[in-house]
Amino acid sequence: MAAGGPVTNDIFKCALRPIGFIDYAVAFTAEEQQRLRNVFAQGVCDWSAPGVEQRAFLGPWQSFGESGNGDR
């Protein structure tokens, strides 16, 4: 799991968003803000959005290779 991510741990690649400094309970200096922008130039994870190419959960183990129509 990643910090801030969902406990379901079902996102392989998170969607990105720009850093929102107001989201944090601390005040960053201008130097710290620039350093963070440099480190996270592509953005930070947006955990409120679905993962990149994430599809809806269809349930656990939909098939074990059987046809599902009673044939064995």
Image: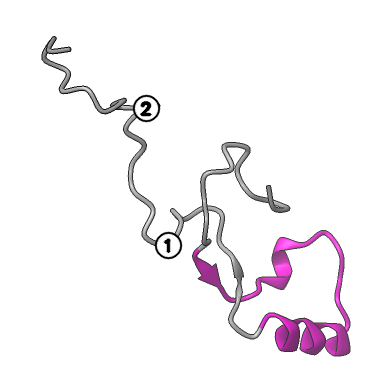
Q: Is residue 41 left or right of residue 69?
A: right
Q: Is residue 11 left or right of residue 54?
A: right
For disc 2, the neighbor class at 10 Å (few under 14, some 14 to 19, many from 20) is few
Total numbered labels placed on residues in the image = 2
Q: For residue 25: magenta?
A: yes
Q: Which residues are magenta?
A: 15-40
Amino acid of disc 2:
Trp
Q: Residue at x 17, y 12 (%)?
A: 72
When asked about the image quadrant of residue 57, the answer is: top left
Q: Residue at x 52, y 61 (%)?
A: 13
Q: What residue is disc 1 on?
A: 52
Front residue of 25 and 40: 40
Q: For residue 36: magenta?
A: yes
The disc, 2 or 1, on the residue closer to the chain's N-terminal end is 1
Q: What residue is disc 2 on?
A: 61
State the separation of the CA atoms marked 2 and 1: 22 Å
Q: Residue at x 86, y 71 (%)?
A: 27
